[in-house]
Image (spheres, helix red, strand yellow):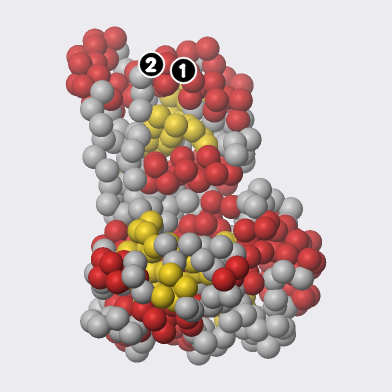
Amino acid sequence: MDKGSFKDYKLSETIASALKGLDYEIPTDVQEKVIPLALEGSDLIVKAQTGSGKTAAFAVPICEMVEWLENKPQALVLTPTRELAVQVKEDFTNIGRFKRIKATAIYGRHPFSIEKTELKQKTHIVIGTPGRVLDHIEKGTLILSKISYLVIDEADRMLDMGFIEQVEAILKELPTERVTMLFSATMPEEIRSISSNYMRNQITIDISEDRITTATIEHALYRVDEEDKFDLLKDIAIIEQPDSCIIFCRTKDRVEMIYKRLSDLGYPCNRIHGGMEQDDRLKAMKRFKRGEFRYLVATDVAARGIDVENISMVINYDIPFEEENYVHRTGRTGRAGLKGKAITFVSSRESRYQHYIEKLIGFELPKLERPSKEEVSVQKPAFDAKINTEPPIKKMKSDQLNKGITKLRFNGGKNKKLRATNFVGVISNIAGVKAEDIGIITVQDSLTYVEILNGKGSLVLETMKTTLIGGKQLKVNKVTDKN
Ligand code: AMP
């Protein structure tokens, strides 16, 4: 069957060119089904896994449909984890880049006051975890009167994290005239009941192709005593020499322990678990995505939703106790048509969980023998050379899109009674600069950030050093980290 093209959806030029910049040419199955219906304003229940391209399936139509001129939030996206909220926000920002869509992520353990200031300004799309969203609703800092689109992402995950009451409390506060889209990997009864209570004439779309494929993921299992697991891990690392590997452990203490032992051995590694500061979690994820280190030791916080390109291997150092998590963990590899390996360690105490997993995935995990001492010693020099060499930094999908974008910081904001229109007025008056060259503007209390597009950053920077805004000369400089 002929695959469609994004051109079929008659998207505006700003959205189409962002998709081109991201190298999205052919819509994925879920996008092909969801985008046309969402553009027509249908309520949708979508059964789709992460990795299917579902974020863009809702982000493209929402970016297309929001009114740029409206200052109050028009779309609300609920996600179960903070990392996912940040990732979805970045996807919206990328897709909406040339329409100057402003997306804000709000989530637990993130400074409330920063979020409050952001929400006071023009915000088209809010992405948040349920608890923090409710907090803002209760404090009156998130205005819901203009919300016309609601997305509940990873809805089944929301249920098992016990968010259902919060989600329902949020749903009760939203305008009833709205489009609701619910995405979930499975469809338990509770989800059906939410949908019948809060959605209208909803259309169900099922894209649940089996993510446990032996075609893209090679599954294997090692029987190993608990005290031998670490030695086995080292041997496998030496034999496989993965470019990029996630090692899943059951608890944060075990993550810390494995991380410490691997770093002591000089492995390029880092870790992520729920006990870490949010900022450190996000930084670790970002560095892993860029390929700055090869081994990420993680609890299940990294199992869901997180999209990292080219993970070549997943190791279940501890078998997951919930069989569903086997699917999510191993789904981190073998994505986007690439091959991956999923290796699970099973101690005698863990064997019953193996049974549940095999029942769920419908096949037996092939058992492998431990690599021999000889095999390991043959590979050791190559392995040592690899871990002692800096890994190449991966290009992010958004790099191409962000080329030609400069972020400028001005040392004045609301304190000097400045508004976004002051900046647009002055900057678009510079010879050679048009209003379309100005991206997202964020006015804070004493600072303002302005994105300049199309390679005009230096021209604007130089000019603004000697040009007044609102009768004032502001200090201006370039921000190096665009994210
Ligand atoms: P998701 O299921 O939203 O986590 O997306 C999985 C991955 O597919 C992400 O890296 C997306 O950037 C990527 N992606 C989504 N849509 C497309 C597309 N149409 N073409 C190529 N890559 C895509």
Examine the rendered structure and indicate whether residue 116 appears above or below residue 196: above
- Mark 2 Cα-neighbour bin, 10 Å: few <14, some 14–19, many ≥20: few
What residue would you read off at disc 1? 261
- Provide residue 404's location: percent of width, then percent of height: 26, 66
Examine the rendered structure and indicate whether residue 316 appears above or below residue 217: above
| Tally of numbered discs | 2
Say if mark 2 contacts mark 1, CB within 8 Å: yes
Name the quadrant containing residue 12. Answer: bottom left
At horizontal 40% and vertical 29% (from top left) the residue drawn is 269
- Provide residue 150's location: percent of width, then percent of height: 62, 75
Q: Tell me the CA gap for discs 2 and 1.
A: 6 Å
What residue would you read off at disc 2? 265
SS for tag 1?
Answer: helix
Q: Is residue 330 visible?
A: yes
Disc 1 residue type?
A: Arg
- Provide residue 475's location: percent of width, then percent of height: 42, 62
In this picture, residue 161 sits left or right of residue 451: right
In this picture, residue 18 sits left or right of residue 474: left
In this picture, residue 319 sits left or right of residue 175: left
At horizontal 24% and vertical 40% (from top left) the residue drawn is 392
At horizontal 51% and vertical 66% (from top left) the residue drawn is 412
| Disc number for residue 248 | none
Query: Which of these two is toward me, 218 or 161?
Result: 161
